[in-house]
Image: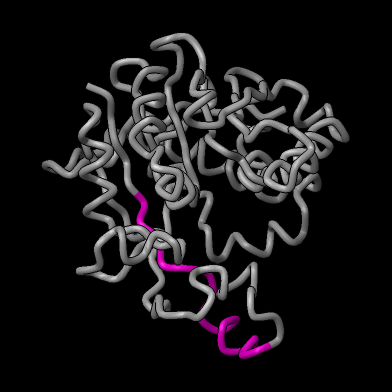
Amino acid sequence: MFKLLLLSSALLLSAPILATPQATADASGIAVSLDQVLRGTWRDPANVARDQYRHPKQTLEFFGLTPHMTVVQLWPGGGWYTEILAPLLGDHGQLIDAAVPAKGDSESDGTVKYLAKLKADPEVYGKVKVVDFSPPAMLDLGPDGSADMVLTFRNLHNWQARSQLGNVFQAAFKVLKHGGVLGVVEHRAAPGKRVGQVFKTGYMPEDYVIEEVEKVGFRLVGQSGINANPRDTRDYPRGVWTLPPTYAEGDKHHAKYQAIGESDRMTLKFVKP
């Protein structure tokens, strides 16, 4: 499928690490592989159109993804990142998607479509392992210390609404190896906002997220502006869903919201000591 080289360095908040020739070569190798995957014909064109906002290549490089990892993705939704992670990990690693159980209700409709997507293309998705994840009843992500990386993209406000954010972070801590990475991308609230004021709008305060993750034992090692969007005013009538790709107000002010693009997002890297 894809022959990938290891990425040997991680971005830290502490003193910068000087790149060796080998580290530079490894980073170049995974960058090329990501480029190949992002051009994959299996990707939904509507998903490809989101690359300009979600910066998957730079985001996964920042988190330190390598092709030999066991990676748990929390609540994959329609499989936007699964289209990228599955082929990257297919030969030498393992992707575990922890999804909302497919129970036949409205909350799980997306999971039903996601599972059909995997089934329709076994060449790309045949090795993806899917587990049920529905806090607080279903929190088991796998054996303790079995994963190299846990990723969550734009999900934290959902767990905050259910008062389950701490349980989710504890589950991630439990499944990760020592030295394992928790990668977080989330809609970022305006500075000074408290979580109770904004989580229902889809946005979360960055300082609150960091505090809650560190409570369970993680250590913050990197913050990136990869997914920042200074055009996002974060004051819309339908919250973050007013913006693309949802356009919750339909055609109303469509051009305005299209010009803003997707939300301003924090991109945080934590490590389990």
Q: Is residue 71 visible?
A: no
Q: Is residue 126 left or right of residue 206?
A: right
Decide: is 273 above or below 157.
above
Count of marks, rendered view? 0
At x 57% / y 19%, what residue is drawn?
Answer: 93
At x 25% / y 62%, what residue is drawn?
Answer: 194
Estimate the x, y position of residue 27 in percent, counting from the top left. Answer: 42, 38
Decide: is 197 above or below 125.
below
* The one of 156 and 270 positioned closer to us in this rendering: 156
At x 47% / y 29%, what residue is drawn?
Answer: 136
Q: Quadrant of the N terminus?
A: top right
Residue occupying the far left of the picture: 15
Q: Is residue 170 left or right of residue 90?
A: left
Region rendered in magenta: 252-267
Decide: is 81 above or below 65.
below
At x 75% / y 49%, what residue is drawn?
Answer: 43
Q: Is residue 208 visible?
A: yes
Q: Quadrant of the C terminus?
A: top left
Q: Is residue 270 left or right of residue 248?
A: left
Estimate the x, y position of residue 223 in percent, counting from the top left. Answer: 27, 50
Q: Is residue 217 left or right of residue 79?
A: left
* The one of 107 and 270 positioned closer to us in this rendering: 107
Q: In the rendered structure, does residue 272 fall within the stretch colored magenta? A: no
